[in-house]
Structures are given as C-alpha cells and as structure tokens.
Image (cartoon, grey):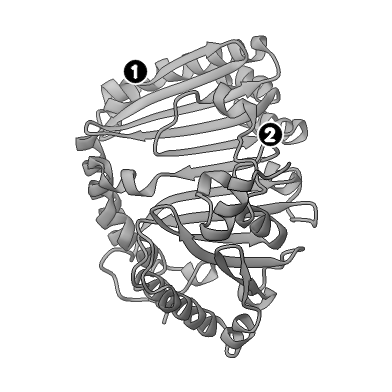
Amino acid sequence: YLLSSGQVRSAESMVPDPQQAYSEQAAVVVYVDAQNAGESAVGRTLAPFLKELPGQLANLPGAEELPMPSASELSFLQSLEGVELAEIVLVMEGEAAQGGTSQMSENDSLLLVTKLTQVLEDQEGLIGQLLALAEQRQSGLSNQVAQTRSREGAAEMFAVPSEAFGDAQLPFPVSLALGPGTGGSVLAFGRTDKVKGFLSGQTTGRLPVTVDKLMSSRGQVWIYASIPPEAAQAMGAGGAQGADQVPMMAGMSESLEQVRNFGMNFSLNSRGLDFQLALGFASSQAAQEMKQSVDGMVGFMKMAASQSPSSASGSLQRLQVGSAGDVFRLSTSVALSELRQGVQIARQQLGASGGMGATAGARP
C-alpha cells in the first residue's frame, strides 16, 4: 500500500480521522458517533443514567470480584478536563477476536481510536493527567511511561508497559498516541505496529465487504463481527441445549451453526431508537430457516406481551423479521417514552441491589 505525497504531508501535520483505522481483515469493528448520539433525544435521556452507572455498578455486592476499575479510578477518569468524545472506532484482528480462542496471541491485534470534540489547547495537560492515572495504577509507572515518549508523525507516542494491565497479559507491545486531528484531537491505543501504521497513514480505512452487505445503512452506533465455523458450531450446540426447554428453538440451533458474520446497528433519532440485528449465513437456505424459526418465537412473544403489558411491550409488538439472500434481519424501534420508563426501572432495580444512591460496600 503506497502513500501519495498528500497523504504523507497529512500524516506529518495531522493525525488521521478514526475511520482511517478500518481494516479489510478486521474480525471485529465497533463504531460510535458519540457526539451526534449524545446530542440526540435518546442521548440526552440516557446521559445522566450512563454517567452514574459505572460508579454505581462498583457499589454492588460482589463487585470487588469483577475486572473493573475501582470507584476512585472511575472518579478520576470522569474528572479528566477537556475530554469530550466525538467519535470512537475499535478494530480487532485475529482468532481471539473471532472467538476461536480465549487467549490473544502474537497474531492478534487491537486498535482503539477516539476523537475529541475539539483540538486540545493544552495537550500537555491531558498527557499529565493520563500519567497521573498511570501513577495511581502503580507507583513509579508514570516515570516509566514518560521515558518512552517519542514523536510519530503529528502525534506524541508512549509505550504502555504490561504493569498497566494488572493480571491481564497481552502477547504484543502496546502504545498510546495523542495528537491534533481535523476538528479535534485524536487518541490511538493498541498494538504498537498498528498504532504506528494508523498514524503514518498506512491503514486502508476500508471495511470488510460483508459490513455493507449486512448493514447498508448504519446509525450512530454499530458493531460488526465475523464468526468462524467452529464458533458457530458452539453457538448451535448452545441452542440445542435450549431446545430441551423451548422446542421451537430446535430449528434455530441448526441454523446458528451456519452463521458466518454478525451486525448490530443502533440509530438514535427524535422518536427514540431504531435497532437492527443482522446475521450473515453460509447459504440462503440457512437464512430462510432462521427466519421461519424466529417468526414463530416472535409471534409467541407478541401474544404474551399483549396479555401482560410492560415497558417493553411496544418494542416487542414492533418487531419485524425478514431475510434477503443469505442475510437474516431482526429489527424493532423503542420509543423515547419507553426508554425513559426503562431507565426508571433500572434505577429502581439498582437501588434495590445496593447500586444507585447506595453507599454501603463502596470500594475506595
């Protein structure tokens, strides 16, 4: 892949946009248009709840056993000044991302790129805050990270030592980079050679062809994943076990063994949220068989929802099932009023579990 003279100049003066991190070899891609999602009616409804959620989860009984930041670390992250996210892209490659193995190997990779809503006037200030966070993780870690500082194109780049990840061990070197981009500062984190490739403009910025096939129209938040045959067979085996309890799942378990890729799309608008799940199959017949199996389950769920209305009844009644060629799709919409009611119920349930508003059991 050869760079044009314009791309070389751009890489030297400006960090690329997050979407340039896309790779045709990606096993997993996650995209979030955080700025537009946050400005939507749904975003404004969910924002207060989501801001409180991580800290409240940390207060739940048994939370100290979960691999999540402590309450003090979460508080520090939320206090970072000048950090308002505009866009997020996560790209993963390799067998681990596909679920082929539970452990990452040197053949796997990840690249996380985020763009802020504006170019930071005080970039050194943010670097200082991030180093302070490293020091919170482990004494002396900030100096260790600071000593690795180097210039890569338009970005400041730092090696992230394995100590920063605690017990989790990654089989490849990891780096963090920060620099000015078009309309906002850009942070890149991941496997060192992937970060360098992104910063220098060597990444293609092209998605796997199956992404457009699954989700030709994508909203502010979407997820794509390829699924190897062995992982699909495991999914089918899980469905077969469920068929003992729900007979109509028998046909679905056989179809799941033929799944080859997966897409999930969320579009936020003034009415609420539109959701679509798409599954790509090895054949058109498998997609049609999945449609027939899910049609029966959806009909049963709609009948049950009409007899016992709840906050989810509306979205269940709006469920639509279809297939086109080797792609199966399930879609629905959630009204803004239903989302508000769902947030209220979640708050009540977390409060009853020792979360929202609770102080007992909080980790330092």
Q: Name the element at disc 1.
A: helix
Relative vertical location of residue 49 with respect to residue 97 in this rendering, above or below? below
Count of picture labels: 2
Residue type highlighted by circle 1: Met
Tell me the quadrant of the picture where the C terminus can be found.
bottom left
Q: Label 1 crowding class (10 Å Cα cut-off): few <14, some 14-19, many 20+?
A: some
Give the SS element for disc 2.
Answer: loop
Looking at the image, the residue that sits furthest to the right is 106
Of the two numbered discs 2 and 1 on the same chain, state the one appearing first in sequence: 2
x and y, in percent, of residue 44 in the image? 23, 48
Q: Is residue 198 left or right of residue 181?
A: right
Find the residue positioned furthest to the front.
Answer: 5
Callout 2 crowding tier (Cα within 10 Å): few <14, some 14–19, many ≥20:
many
Name which residue lies at 22% across and 41% down: 41
In-front residue for pair 175/54: 175
| Cα distance between the residues tagged 2 and 1 | 33 Å
Residue located beneath label 2 in the image = 227
- Quadrant of the image occupied by residue 240: top right
Residue at x 64% of width, y 67% of height = 175
Judging by the rendered image, the residue that carries numbered circle 1 is: 303
Quadrant where the N terminus sits is top right
Q: Position of residue 342 (x, y in %)?
A: 27, 43
Amino acid carrying mark 2 in the image: Ile
Can residue 320 be seen here? yes
Image mark for residue 293: none
The residue located at (25%, 67%) in the rendering is: 357
Q: Nearer the viewer, residue 209 or 254?
A: 209
Residue 246 in sight in this render: no
Q: Is 34 left, or right, of 30 in this rendering? A: left
Furthest toward the bottom, the residue is: 140
